[in-house]
Amino acid sequence: MTKVRRDRAILAAGGAALGIAALALLSGERKRPLRRPTQVEPGRSIGNLTLGALSLATVAMVEAPLTRPLTERAERKRQGLVQRLPLSAWARDALAVLLMDYTIYLWHVATHKAPFLWRFHLVHHIDLDLDTTTALRFHAADMAISAPFRAAQVAAIGVSRRALRIWQGWFFLSILFHHSNLRLPERFERLLARFVTTPRMHGIHHSAVQGETESNWSSGFAFWDHLHRTFRLDVPQEEIAIGVPAYRDPRALGVRRSLALPFGRERDAWSAPPLRKPASMQ
Ligand SMILES: [Zn+2]
């Protein structure tokens, strides 16, 4: 098999595996929901999937052409941090994946703390429920804005083509999983959360209580939250109201209003009183 054909076969197998994982999560979260949904379906899901399609198209058009030549250069010229280390190719790639995962943690904190970045990340956080479709609910401009950062990550770390593909697959799978509304046995999830970002962890990050949102920034491995002491698993999911206090109108979740949101007048996201789920919904 030629290298190109082998690469295509690996990509196709990876894509199929991700598709199967997505379907399994979509069906699992309906059978065993972690939090009770508050919105009428399918309107919300269709909006999220449409925003997701626009975001994926933006990644393909903006990010991929930026990162591809950088991965080739990292390999050819042995440029970037991991390429200079006296390690085997697999060890370099494993370290590159780990460093990509860590720098995404830092980027996620920045998207909340830097007002310009928050305007776009807010579109993801105003969803009033959290499930597998939220994993795709990003503003397309958010993807375009993060592309130069992704290019800087790839160049500085020295990410190879193989490492980038592994990281992309891992990152996408993790995002689908931790946004899902899948109820896992609590003791199992506590164990899992030592290593990877889980649905209960990310549910707390999507809480309408600011102090809770400012935790669990990890998007892949959970090590970074443990390392920075930003890990929390102490909020019962049935008490969490998902969303942002200043943006509670379900009509604002639609595609057109979501795309316009970052360009309008910004509200003080956390100024409204802290939200908890009304007793009737618990
Ligand atoms: Zn966030």
Image: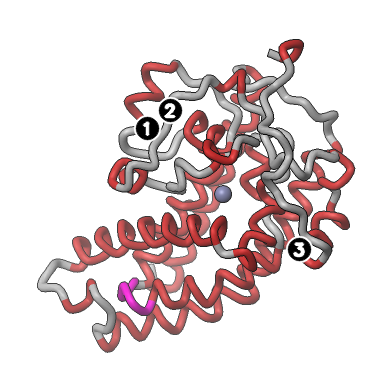
* Residue 78 place in picture, x, y as percent: 24, 83
Q: Is mark 1 on a helix, strand or loop?
A: loop
Q: Give the range drawn in magenta.
A: 155-159
Residue at (28, 46) in percent of width and height = 227
The residue labelled by disc 3 is 262
State which tag comes first along the sequence, 1 or 3: 1
- In the image, residue 197 sits, relative to residue 151, either above or below, namely above
Predominant secondary structure, magenta span: helix
Is label 3's Cβ within 8 Å of ligand 1?
no
Structural distance between the alpha carbons of marks 2 and 1: 9 Å
Report whether 223 appears left or right of 92: right
The residue labelled by disc 1 is 193
The quarter holding residue 197 reads: top left
* Residue 15 place in picture, x, y as percent: 54, 52
Q: Which of marks 1 and 3 is in front?
A: 3
| Extreme residue in the bottom direction | 77
Q: Kindly identify which numbered label has been placed on residue 233.
A: 2
Residue at (53, 36) in percent of width and height = 212
State which tag comes first along the sequence, 2 or 1: 1
Pointer 3 with pointer 2, Cβ within 8 A: no
Pointer 2 with pointer 1, Cβ within 8 A: yes
